[in-house]
Image: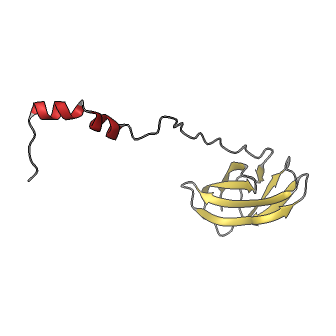
Amino acid sequence: MLPQADLPTVQAFCTSSVYSSAMNLRPAAFTPATASPAAPVTDVRVYPNPATDAATISFSGLAAGRVSAYVTDMVGHRVQTIMDREPIGPGEQQKSFSTAGLAAGLYQCVLETADGQRSVVRLSVAH
């Protein structure tokens, strides 16, 4: 059983420097970090939409580098990898992928660059 404190004892403790020091755990110069989200990749398209057996993801506006693209369900679970850190050149890029193994429904195609840019495009699959 925990000891019980009377009201004057609690009030005295709460106004003491011990209590105020314990409640102020942040250093005086603390400033919360603000994470700036990566810029989205522009000009990303997935077609045909809705897709039946296959679809193509196309994108442009990126410099040469490495790109990953994948399909997630609407909860965010990765269900298919389209590209995994593949090198690309500048200009328009296209990559076809099969949708035959996906159940009919809504998905998201995610495109990510090595420097953290990200774009999400919805994809409907109908068989």
Percent across and percent down for residue 64 are 88, 56
Q: Nearer the viewer, residue 17 or 10?
A: 17
Is residue 54 found left or right of 104 in the rendered image? right
Give the quarter of the image for residue 35. Answer: top right
The relative height of residue 107 versus residue 98 in the rendered view (above or below) is: above
What residue lies at 86% left-to-right and 56% top-to-bottom? 93
What residue lies at 75% left-to-right and 57% top-to-bottom? 114
Quadrant housing the C terminus: bottom right
Q: Nearer the viewer, residue 100 or 67?
A: 67
Percent across and percent down for residue 42 are 79, 44
Give the quarter of the image for residue 69. Answer: bottom right
Q: Residue furthest front?
A: 17
Percent across and percent down for residue 41 are 76, 47
- The answer to whether residue 99 shows anywhere in this view is no
Q: Residue furthest bottom?
A: 101
The relative height of residue 63 versus residue 55 in the rendered view (above or below) is: above
The relative height of residue 4 versus residue 101 in the rendered view (above or below) is: above
Q: How many marks?
A: 0
Percent across and percent down for residue 78 are 61, 63
What residue lies at 32% left-to-right and 41% top-to-bottom? 22
Q: Nearer the viewer, residue 33 or 82?
A: 33
- The answer to whether residue 35 shows anywhere in this view is yes
Give the quarter of the image for residue 85. Answer: bottom right
Is residue 99 found left or right of 35 in the rendered image? right
Is residue 27 found left or right of 127 in the rendered image? left
Q: Nearer the viewer, residue 14 or 18?
A: 18
What residue lies at 57% left-to-right and 56% top-to-bottom? 76
Query: In the rendered view, how is the structure colored?
Result: secondary structure
Is residue 16 found left or right of 119 in the rendered image? left
